Image (spheres, rainbow, N blue to C red):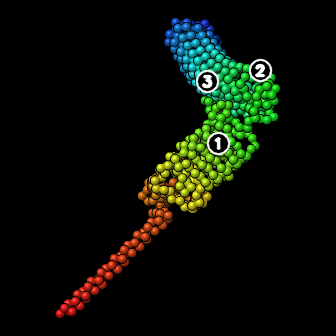
Amino acid sequence: MRTNQKPIVTLIFFIMFLTLINNSLVFAGTTEGDYTYSLKDGNITIEKYLGKGGNITIPEKLAGYPVTSIGEYAFSKCKTTTSLTIPSSVTSIGSRAFCDFLGLKSVIIPDSVTTIDYQAFQGCIGLESVIIPNNVKNINSSAFSDCTALTSVKLPDNLTILDDYIFKGCTSLVDISIPENVTSIGQCTFENCVKLSSVILPDNVAHIESLAFKNCSSLNNVIFSKELESIGAGAFSDCISLSALIIPDGVTTIDSNAFDGCTGLTSIYIPASTTKISEWYVFDNCKKLTIYGKKGSTAEEYAINQNIPFAVNDFQFAISNGCATFTGYTGTSSSISIPETFSGCPVTDIGESALSKYSGSSLTIPESVTKIGKNAFSDSKLTKIALSNNVKTIGDAAFSNCFELTDLSIGSGVTEIGDGVFTGSTIRNLSIDKNNHSYSLQDGILFNNTKTDLIQVIYNNSDSYVIPENVTTLGEAAFVNFKTLTSVTIPDSVTSIGSNAFNGCSQLGNAYFLGNAPKMGTSVFGNTSENFKVHYINDKTGFSDTWNGYEATTSRMPPMIWIVTGIIGVLFLSGLLLLLLIFRRKKKRSKQHIKANLGNEEITENLMS
């Protein structure tokens, strides 16, 4: 008798269907341990914490399914919790999930989290620090607002927007590092952060929204982004510690009340690009203010209409920690003197590329300057520059490609000179103060004071050059574009050669190494003669037939050394021959003298007999 299989098959399909539905339906309000949760698509969302607080470790799984979300209000108003561990299975923290979590002091958010929702940690008045991983792409508005004990935050690199109110009322926040990819600072983002003292806006920030930094009463330093376009209404209102600001070129709009109540503000530079300045209380209660800008600019027109003092200024500065950096000159004068102070701050730095491609010929640098930045004067037409004894640092390529520069004096205070500082320049009169204990000049070549580091050739027309015996390091771009050089001899004392050291020496055909192979940078002998060869002595180590990509061959001795040795040998043999001749002449005279004496004795004897 055949059994009817149909009911059994139907039952199996029904069970499979229920299993499939179980994974796709939402099951809410289920409780396990201290947690009420919901299940959807095989993922758990914690809806409510039912425990007594203390040290909470959220489980990675409930009912055998991964916990991926912390739901809205799930842990809000937990007054007795001191620590919280969030598992690596969690990808989303919901709105108000931990709001008013009063006892929480610190939280480490796992790398798995990508979203922190609206007011997630709002009002956590005990929270002192938080680390947000780089995978977090969205931090929604008010996420950490009114966390009054929060002193520091590590924001994720992938963040592009600082949303509205995120840190509003974080009255203990003293420092914030804004990631490079952020393009906008939201409305009221840092409002009432009364201990925040300094803000550096990365270059991608284009907009500062309304009230973004309102009542940041300790804020005394703001460095604006290069790409900034607009400053919103009341953005810096009541920032009473601000004293000087420089609005960057590119800003087109300053909205109403932007700097209202900044009672300590004494100067602000507004560029010619700013064509819209609101008539509504932008600088209300800024009684000490002078506006700086271009003649005929919107800034000048605005200052006149608002009875605010105005001064024409072609010099550009950035202010940080009470010191000013000279960043550029927009005027047309062929002779300029950089001011010693700006807005009451000493000018201590010449910024990166500050006068690059400047077409004027004359420059006076104040004695307040201690640092010359990278490419500060590169490609300019300056003819003479004098650095005071207060300058300590000269950055990479600071005077590179200054084809008109003939005279440069370096003071006693310089202790650091970067790479390629003089590359491509035509300096003929370089002087270093006799009291400088860091650098020296010999035959137009710059060395450190002990002459162990050969830094750079300034002017030298030799076709062959023997590096001095005690040199251990050839600096980066040391001989770059030395067009007359045909051969170089490198002593066994040299252990390191910097990148591009001989790059562009188009006539250089031979490099003779007297010691073991030194450590080499990149493109050391790039763009040299087509027939360039490396020569090394047989018993020295570290070389090969194609050493660092250059043809290499063994050689007993390089021509220059051979010549020098030959000359010494000839002189030595000549000296020996001369001594031999002198000895023979003396010997001959001695014999003659003896004969003469003998003859005299014979005569005397004959006479007596």
Furthest residue to the front?
608
Q: Residues within 10 Å of mark 2 (few under 14, many from 20)?
A: some
State if disc 3 and disc 2 touch (CB < 8 Å).
Answer: no
* x 72%, y 22%: residue: 286
| In-front residue for pair 599/465 | 599
Amino acid residing under circle 2: Tyr
- Give the number of the disc on residue 288: none
Q: Which residue is mark 2?
A: 281
Residue 556 appears anywhere in the view? yes
Amino acid residing under circle 3: Ser
402, above or below 74, in the image: below
* x 54%, y 45%: residue: 412
State if disc 1 and disc 3 touch (CB < 8 Å).
Answer: no
Displayed quadrant of residue 328? top right
| In-front residue for pair 278/120 | 278
Amino acid residing under circle 1: Ile
- Give the number of the disc on residue 365: 1
Q: Where's the C terminus, which quadrant? A: bottom left
In the image, taking residue 515 as reference, residue 602 lies left or right, namely left
Residue 119 lies, in percent from the top left, at: 64, 14
Residue 534 lies, in percent from the top left, at: 52, 58
Q: Where's the N terminus, which quadrant? A: top right
In the image, taking residue 534 as reference, residue 71 lies left or right, namely right
Distance (Cα) linking label 3 and label 1: 30 Å
